[in-house]
Structure formats: C-alpha cells, structure tokens
Image: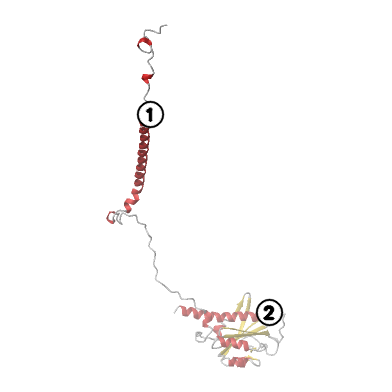
Amino acid sequence: MSFGQGGSQWGPGGSRPPWGSQTPDWAALADAAESRQRRRRWLLIGGGALATVAIGTAVAVAVVSANSGSDTAGNQPTSQLPTNAALPSETIEPVPSFAPTSVAPPLDPKDFISSAKKDTAPLTPGSLFPGSQLTVGETVYQKGDMTSTGNCASAVQGATLGKVLTQNGCQQLIRASYMKDKIAVTVGVAVFETEAQATKAKQQADSKDNVTSLSGGGVGTFCRSEICRKTTNSYGRYLYLTIAGFINDKDVAQKDSAVFKIGDDLQVFTVRQIHRRGEAQASAAANQ
C-alpha cells in the first residue's frame, strides 16, 4: 500500500530508528526549565518593584503639588512676603467718642420741705391757699378768712395741743376756712424747723384737740362746742389739721358724708400745696 511519492515516514529504508540512541537529556532539560522559571520570577519581582516606585513617586509629586501653595509662602523670608498695601484690608467704621459726663440725679421736692435750711421760700396764707375759691371735681368751695400767727398755741383748742406745738418748736400757724351749703372747714398748718419735730408733734397730739375754727369772710362761727370731724397729719416739716362741721351748731354724725368730703378735700389740697412748694424750690435749685 502506497501513501504517495514521499516514501517512508521513518527515514531511508522505511525502518524506525532505534530508541536507545535518541534518549533526551533530562538533567539538561530540568536545568533549562529552572533557569526559565527563575528568569520569570525575577521579571515579575522587578516589574512589581518598578510599579511600586512609580506609584510612590506619583503620590509624592501630588503631595508636593498640593502643599506648594501654602508651605512655599509660609517658608518664604519676610522680604518675599506681600507688603501691607497688597494685603486685603477690612473697612472699620469710626466709633464716635463722647466726653464723659455726669448727670446729677433729680432733686427730691420733699428734701426742700423737710428742713427750714432748704425750705426758704416765702410762706404766707396766700401762698398756701391762693384764690377766692377751691374747685375739686365738680364741687366748688368758697374761701373765707385767712390768718397767720407765730404764737401757735393761741390758734388751737383743747387741753394739750397748744403745749405740744410749743414744746416741739412750732414757728408759725396758718389758718384758712372754706364753706359750701352751710358746711364749713378750717385747715391749720403748723410749721416746724425740721420734719422730726412735726412728726413728733403729730404723735403727741390728742385726737380730741384741734385747730380753732376760723370765721369771717362769709363763713359763720362753727365747731366751738358741738361735735365736729377732726383730722391731724404731717408732711415734711409741716403739721396740718382740719376741723369741719355745720354752721348752725348741729353735731356731725357718721352719715354726714358732705362734712367728711369737705374735710378730706382740704386735706388733699393742703398736702399738695406743700408738695408743690417743694417742687418749685427743687426746680429752682436744679437750674442754678
């Protein structure tokens, strides 16, 4: 059987060569394979090292680049830093300055009517009770006579009030009377050197004693023997008293509200007049 013109596949004569003469050199082949393996390992190690170095170099360059904007300027000598003119400046609004001042506290009017040393304004019946009538709300009281005396005991009635006024140094006693519909009131103002004297006189005064009612100027006689409504108070160096009742000698009862009202209205008016006196003197002193 022929397989073509090529002749035998085993060499001339068509016979297979003997195996003994063609045995491979296994040691040489092993050495060659090991050499190739070593070269491959070294190539891999070298490549990894080169890659690591390359990555480290890239990171270092990135860090240097990132820090170059701040560290470079921070490490520059002073001569290389920007001048003050080149630096941004913040506009500061000027703060107004004021010269130190001291404002005196307002003067207390009561200080001026608590001692004769400060209470030096003229004091007369007309200055305390001006005009010819007194209007309180819708009520109008007609004013009668006024009087003033330096002998305070002579213008009061009762067993002890005159003595109390004298012992505490009463300097002057002013009286004025008002009337409406046959009901009258006399208000008396006793003046002392100090507030302490006026307060002591009020404490020592007997509630049964009071100023003597003042008639005249259209006001008839009242409250000489009959029961009348009486009050006693003090403010500053002034002791003020009221006695109110009927002109027709009628006794005052608790139900007689018109008598209580005229007495209360005159009390309030009198203490306000004393306070206004202090206000006027405090204002004058503050404007000096």
In this orientation, which residue lies closer to the viewer: 136 or 182? 136
| 66, above or below 133, in the image | above
Residue 37 position (above or below residue 150): above
Residue 101 located left or right of residue 126: left
Q: Is residue 204 left or right of residue 103?
A: right
Farthest residue in the front direction? Answer: 20
What is the quadrant of the C terminus in the image?
bottom left
The percent coordinates of residue 188 (x first, y second) are 60, 86
Residue 190 visible in the shown view: no
Indicate which disc residue 258 carries: 2
Q: Earlier in the sequence, mark 1 or mark 2?
A: 1
Give the numbered dot on residue 201: none
| x then y, percent, for residue 179 | 64, 82
Identified by mark 2, the residue type is Ala
Q: Secondary structure at mark 2?
A: helix
Q: Residue at x 49, y 79 (%)?
A: 282
Q: Is the C-beta separation of discs 1 and 2 under 8 Å? A: no
Circle 1 crowding by C-alpha within 10 Å: few under 14, some 14–19, many from 20:
few
Q: Quadrant of residue 211?
A: bottom right
Q: Nearer the viewer, residue 16 or 86?
A: 16
The N terminus: image quadrant = top left
Residue 30, position as x, y percentages in the image: 38, 29
Residue ID for mark 1: 30
Type of the residue with mark 1: Ala
Q: Residue furthest left?
A: 79
Q: Above or below — where is 25 with respect to 79?
A: above
Tell me how far mark 1 sits from mark 2, CA to CA: 146 Å
